[in-house]
Image (spheres, coloured by chain):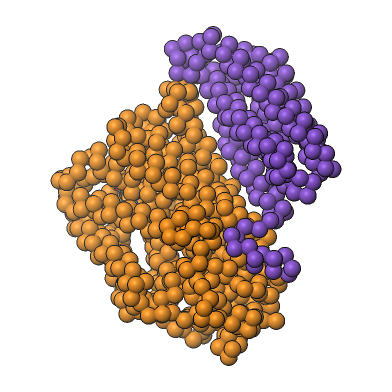
C-alpha cells in the first residue's frame, strides 16, 4: 500500500486530534511539560530558542566589529576588546549556532517523521543532550563576566598564546568541551534511530535525502568530536597544572596542537554543511515537482564527503611549518573533496531542468544558497592551492571565504529550512511577500558585506585587526553598510515569523505539495506523529503520490 | 508490526529496544576509543621525537605495581562477564557476588594507583614544579603524558565504579533480571573498555624500553 493512501485513509485527521503543542508527553503541564519532555519535536523547538538567540547575539557582535571598522583609527574599541569580540563571535557562531543548528532543530523534528517513526531511539538521552547544550552555553556566558575577562585567543585557541593568555580561556574552552558532548550524544542518537526505527518498507535507498545527510553528519559528530574533546582537555590541564604537553617552553609541539585542532575542525565544516545540503535536496524536488536527479549519487556523495573530509585537515596549516610532502598531499585531497560537492550542485541543477518550477520563498532561498555557496566553494579551491594560499592565508580573503561557505551556505539554508518547514512545525503560514523581499535584501546585504573582503584580502588586509590602512577605507565602508542591511534583514525575518505564529493564517497539512512523510500528517503534527506506522512502497520523491494524497 | 502497535499506548515515547541500546553503547565506546586515540597520537609523536629520554623516564616507573594492577583489572573484567552470564541464567546471587567483587578490585586498582602517584610526588615529580621543569624536555613530556593518561584512565575507573554500583543496586532490586539485562550488559562493555585502555597504557609506559 502506498504511504500516501495510508496516511489519508488510516489516519483520517479528526478535528479533535491534538497537536504536540497541546498534548504533553509527561504528567506535567505548562513549562515543565516542555522542560521534561521526551518528544523529539518539542526538544527540537527548545533547541530552536537557544540556537536562534545565540545566532542573533553573534550577529550583533559582528555588527559591532563592523562598526569599529567603519573608518580607520580604532575609534570605538580598544585592540583588546576587538580581540575578545572576534573570539566570542567565532565561538558563538561555530559552537552554539552553526554546528548544532540544522541537526538539532530540524534533524530532531523531522528525522523521525521522515523515516516513519514516533521518536528517536533514545528520547531521554535526547533531552539530556539539550541540557548539556544549555549548560555549555551558560558556561560560555559565565566566562565573559569572571575576572580575567573574556577569552581573546580567536576561536582556534592556538598554542602557545592560549596557555599564556590571562583571559578566561579555560572556562570558555571547557564550555566548548561540554558542547561537544551534546553533539556526540545527538550523533549516537541519530545513527541508532536511522538503523533501528525506519518504517517497514523504508530501505536505506528509500530514505529522503535529508535523512541521508543527517545520518552522515551524525557519523562525523561521533568520529570527529572526541578528538577536539581531548585536545581541549589537554589545553585546560596544561593551563591548570603546568603539565607539559603542547607548550614549546616545556618541549611541546604547537604544530601538533594545530593538527589535533583541525582533525576535528575540518570535519566539523562538514557537520555544518552536510545537513544543509540535505535540506536543499528536499526543497528542490518539491518546488520543481520532479523527482531528484541522481538520488543515489547524492546519497553516496554525502558519505564520500564525510569520509574524504576527514583527511584534508592539513590545508589549514600550509604556512605553519608542516613538511612540503604533507602540504601537497593535503592540497591534493582538498581538491578531491570538491568533487562530491560538485556532484551535488550538478544534480540539483539537473533536477530543476524541465521541472515545473514554483518559485515560492523556500525555493528562492535555495537559489540564493547555490550562488553564495558556489562562490564560497570556488574560493575554497583558491585557498586549497598551495601557491595562492601562501599569498592569501590569514587575510580577509579567508574571512570572506568562510563566511560565504558557512553563512552563505549553511546559514542561508538554515533560514530556507524555516521557510520550508515553518507551516508544518507551527501550523501557520507566514507572509510570502515579506519572505520574497527578505531574500533580495539578504542577498544584497550579504554580498556587500563580504565581497569587498575578497578584494581587501587580495590586497593584503590581514584578518583579526581592529584597525587598517586608509587605502582600505572604501571597501571597509561598503562592507559595514552591507552589515546593516544584512542584520536588519535577519531581524525582519525573525519578526515576520513571530507575527505569523501569532497572527498568521492556518497552514494546511501540505502547503507546498511535498511528498515525503512529514507532508502526510497534520500541521502541526500530533504527539505520536503517526497513528499507524506507515508501510513505504514509493520512492521518496515520487510525485505521482501527490494525486492520491489530494484525491483522498 | 505488533510491537509498533504496542508502542501507541506508550505516551512517553520511550520504548524498549535492546539491540538499539547495544548499538548506542558501541557507538559511545567508539568515541571513547577516539578520545584516548588522540592521546596515543600525542604519545607516539613525542616518543618519536625524544626516544632516549622516554626510555630513561620509563625506567623510573614501578613495573611491579603496574603488573599487579594489570592482573587486578583483567580479573575484574572476568568477574563482570561472569555476573552477566549469571543473570542471564537467572542466578541473582552469583551475579551480585561477582559485581561486588568487581567493585572491590576496582577499588584496589585505585589504591595502588594512589600509592604509585604518591611516591612520584614525594620524589618531586609534580607537574609544574621546579624539579620537574628542570628536567630535559623529553622527560617533562613523558611525565606529563603519564599523569594525564593514567589520570584520565583512573577517572574512567571511578565512573565505571559508579555505574557498576548502580547496576548492583538494580540487580538486588530486581530491576535487572533474567529477561531484561541490557543495562548490565552495556555497563560490562564499558568496563571491558576501561580494561582494554589499560592494556595499552601499561606496556607503553611501564614496559617498552
Ligand atoms: C551576521 C552577520 C555577521 C557579521 C557582520 C560578521 C562579521 C565578522 C567580522 C567583522 C569578523 C572579523 C574579521 C576579522 O577581523 O578578522 C568575523 C569573523 C568570524 N565570523 Fe562572522 N559575521 C557574521 C556572521 C557569521 C556567521 C553566521 C558565522 C558562522 C556561521 C560567522 C563566523 C565567523 C568566524 C568563525 C570568524 C573568525 C573568528 C576568528 O577570527 O577567530 N560569522 N565575522
Ligand atoms: Cu578545512
Query: Whole-percent x and y of residue A342?
Result: 52, 65
Q: Is residue B199 in sight in this rendering?
A: no
Write down the colour of chain A.
orange
Residue at the extreme top of the image, as rendered: B123
* Rendered image quadrant of residue A123: bottom right
Answer whether residue B110 is visible to the viewer in this image.
Answer: yes
Of residues A434 and A522, the one nearer the viewer is: A522
Q: Identify which residue is drawn at 37% across, 32% down.
A: A161
In the rendered view, tell whether residue A11 sits above or below residue A146: below
User: Residue at 39% of width from left, 77% of height from top?
Assistant: A429
Q: Nearer the viewer, residue A381 or A418?
A: A418
Residue B189: where, in percent of width, then height?
Answer: 71, 40
Q: Choose top left, top right, bottom left or bottom right for residue A506.
A: bottom left
Answer left or right for A231 relative to A58. Answer: right
Residue A241 drawn above or below residue A176: above
Identity of the residue furthest to the bottom in this view: A551
Report the side of A170 relative to A205 (left or right).
Answer: left
The spot of residue B44 in percent (x, y) is: 60, 30
Q: Is residue A455 left or right of residue A537?
A: left
In the picture, which quadrant includes the N terminus of chain A? bottom right
Placement of A278 over or under A260, stated as above or below: below
Rendered position, B72 above or below A415: above
Q: Position of residue A158 (x, y in %)?
A: 41, 37
Q: Which chain is purple?
A: B
Q: Residue at x 52, y 78 (%)?
A: A16
Quarter in which the C terminus of chain A is drawn: bottom right
Residue at 65% in and 27% down: B201
Amino acid at each position: 500500500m502506498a504511504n500516501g493512501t495510508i496516511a489519508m485513509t488510516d489516519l483520517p485527521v479528526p478535528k479533535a486530534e491534538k497537536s504536540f503543542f497541546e498534548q504533553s508527553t509527561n504528567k506535567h503541564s505548562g513549562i515543565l511539560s516542555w522542560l521534561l519532555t521526551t518528544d523529539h519535536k518539542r526538544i527540537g523547538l527548545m533547541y530552536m530558542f537557544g540556537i536562534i538567540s545565540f545566532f542573533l547575539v553573534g550577529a550583533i557582535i559582528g555588527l559591532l566589529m563592523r562598526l569599529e571598522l567603519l573608518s580607520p583609527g580604532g575609534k570605538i574599541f580598544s585592540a583588546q576588546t576587538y580581540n575578545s569580540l572576534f573570539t566570542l563571535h567565532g565561538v558563538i557562531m561555530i559552537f552554539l549556532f552553526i554546528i548544532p543548528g540544522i541537526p538539532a532543530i530540524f534533524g530532531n523534528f523531522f528525522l523521525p517523521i521522515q523515516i516513519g517513526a514516533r521518536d528517536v531511539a533514545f528520547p531521554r538521552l535526547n533531552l539530556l543532550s539539550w541540557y548539556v547544550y544549555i549548560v555549555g552555553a551558560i558556561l560560555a556566558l559565565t566566562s565573559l563576566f569572571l575576572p580575567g575577562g573574556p577569552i581573546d585567543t580567536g576561536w582556534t585557541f592556538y598554542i602557545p598564546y592560549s596557555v599564556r593568555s590571562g583571559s578566561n580561556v579555560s572556562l570558555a574552552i571547557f564550555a566548548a568541551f561540554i558542547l561537544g558532548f551534546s553533539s556526540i550524544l545527538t550523533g549516537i542518537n541519530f545513527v541508532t534511530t536511522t538503523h533501528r526505527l525506519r518504517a517497514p518498507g523504508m530501505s536505506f535507498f528509500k530514505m529522503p535525502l535529508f535523512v541521508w545527510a543527517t545520518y552522515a553528519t551524525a557519523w562525523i559528530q561521533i568520529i570527529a568530536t572526541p578528538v577536539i574533546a581531548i585536545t581541549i582537555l589537554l589545553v585546560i590541564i596544561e593551563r591548570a597544572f603546568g603539565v607539559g604537553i603542547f607548550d614549546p617552553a616545556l618541549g611541546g609541539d604547537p604544530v601538533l596542537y594545530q593538527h589535533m585542532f583541525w582533525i576535528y575542525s575540518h570535519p566539523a565544516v562538514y557537520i555544518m554543511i552536510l545537513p544543509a545540503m540535505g535540506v536543499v535536496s528536499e526543497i528542490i524536488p518539491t518546488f520543481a515537482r520532479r523527482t531528484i536527479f541522481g538520488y543515489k549519487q547524492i546519497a553516496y556523495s554525502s558519505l564520500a564527503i564525510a569520509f574524504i573530509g576527514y583527511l584534508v585537515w592539513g590545508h589549514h596549516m600550509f604556512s605553519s611549518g608542516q613538511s612540503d610532502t604533507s602540504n601537497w598531499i593535503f592540497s591534493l585531497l582538498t581538491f578531491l573533496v570538491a568533487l562530491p560537492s560538485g556532484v551535488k550542485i550538478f544534480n540539483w541543477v539537473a533536477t530543476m531542468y524541465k521541472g515545473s518550477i514554483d518559485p515560492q520563498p523556500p525555493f528562492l532561498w535555495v537559489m540564493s544558497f547555490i550562488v553564495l555557496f558556489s562562490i564560497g566553494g570556488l574560493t575554497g579551491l583558491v585557498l586549497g592551492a598551495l601557491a595562492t594560499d601562501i599569498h592569501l592565508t590569514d587575510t580577509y580573503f579567508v574571512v570572506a571565504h568562510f563566511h560565504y561557505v558557512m553563512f552563505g551556505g549553511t546559514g542561508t539554508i538554515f533560514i530556507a529550512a524555516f521557510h520550508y518547514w515553518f507551516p508544518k512545525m507551527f501550523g501557520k503560514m507566514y507572509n510570502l511577500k515579506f519572505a520574497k523581499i527578505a531574500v533580495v535584501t539578504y542577498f544584497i546585504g550579504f554580498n556587500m558585506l563580504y565581497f569587498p573582503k575578497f578584494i581587501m584580502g587580495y590586497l593584503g588586509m590581514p584578518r583579526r585587526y581592529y584597525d587598517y590602512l586608509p587605502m582600505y577605507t572604501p571597501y571597509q565602508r561598503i562592507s559595514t553598510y552591507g552589515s546593516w542591511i544584512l542584520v536588519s534583514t535577519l531581524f525582519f525575518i525573525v519578526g515576520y515569523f513571530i507575527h505569523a505564529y501569532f497572527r498568521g493564517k492556518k497552514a494546511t497539512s501540505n502547503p507546498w505539495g511535498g511528498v515525503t512523510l512529514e507532508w502526510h500528517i497534520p500541521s502541526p503534527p500530533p504527539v505520536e506523529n503517526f497513528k499507524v506506522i506507515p508501510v513505504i512502497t514509493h520512492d521518496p520523491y515520487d510525485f505521482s503520490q501527490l494525486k492520491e494524497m489530494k484525491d483522498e | 508490526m505488533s510491537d509498533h502497535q504496542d508502542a501507541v499506548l506508550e505516551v512517553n515515547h520511550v520504548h524498549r529496544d535492546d539491540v538499539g541500546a547495544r548499538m548506542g553503547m558501541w557507538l559511545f565506546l567508539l568515541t571513547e576509543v577516539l578520545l584516548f586515540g588522540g592521546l596515543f597520537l600525542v604519545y607516539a609523536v613525542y616518543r618519536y621525537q625524544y626516544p632516549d629520554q622516554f626510555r630513561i623516564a620509563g625506567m623510573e616507573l614501578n613495573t611491579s605495581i603496574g603488573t599487579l594492577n594489570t592482573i587486578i583489572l583483567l580479573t575484574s573484567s572476568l568477574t563482570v562477564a561472569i555476573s552477566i552470564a549469571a543473570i542471564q541464567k537467572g542466578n541473582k546471587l552469583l551475579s551480585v557476588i561477582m559485581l561486588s567483587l568487581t567493585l572491590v578490585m576496582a577499588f584496589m586498582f585505585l589504591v595502588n594507583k594512589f600509592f604509585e602517584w604518591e611516591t612520584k610526588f614525594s620524589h618531586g615529580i609534580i607537574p609544574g614544579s621546579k624539579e620537574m621543569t628542570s628536567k630535559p624536555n623529553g622527560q617533562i613530556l613523558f611525565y606529563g603524558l603519564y599523569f594525564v593518561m593514567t589520570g584520565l584512565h583512573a577517572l574512567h575507573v571511578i565512573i565505571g565504579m559508579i555505574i557498576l554500583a548502580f547496576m548492583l543496586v538494580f540487580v538486588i532490586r530486581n530491576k535487572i533480571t533474567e529477561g531484561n539485562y541490557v543495562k548490565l550488559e552495556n555497563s560490562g562493555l564499558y568496563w571491558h573498555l576501561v580494561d582494554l585502555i589499560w592494556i595499552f597504557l601499561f606496556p607503553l609506559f611501564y614496559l617498552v624500553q
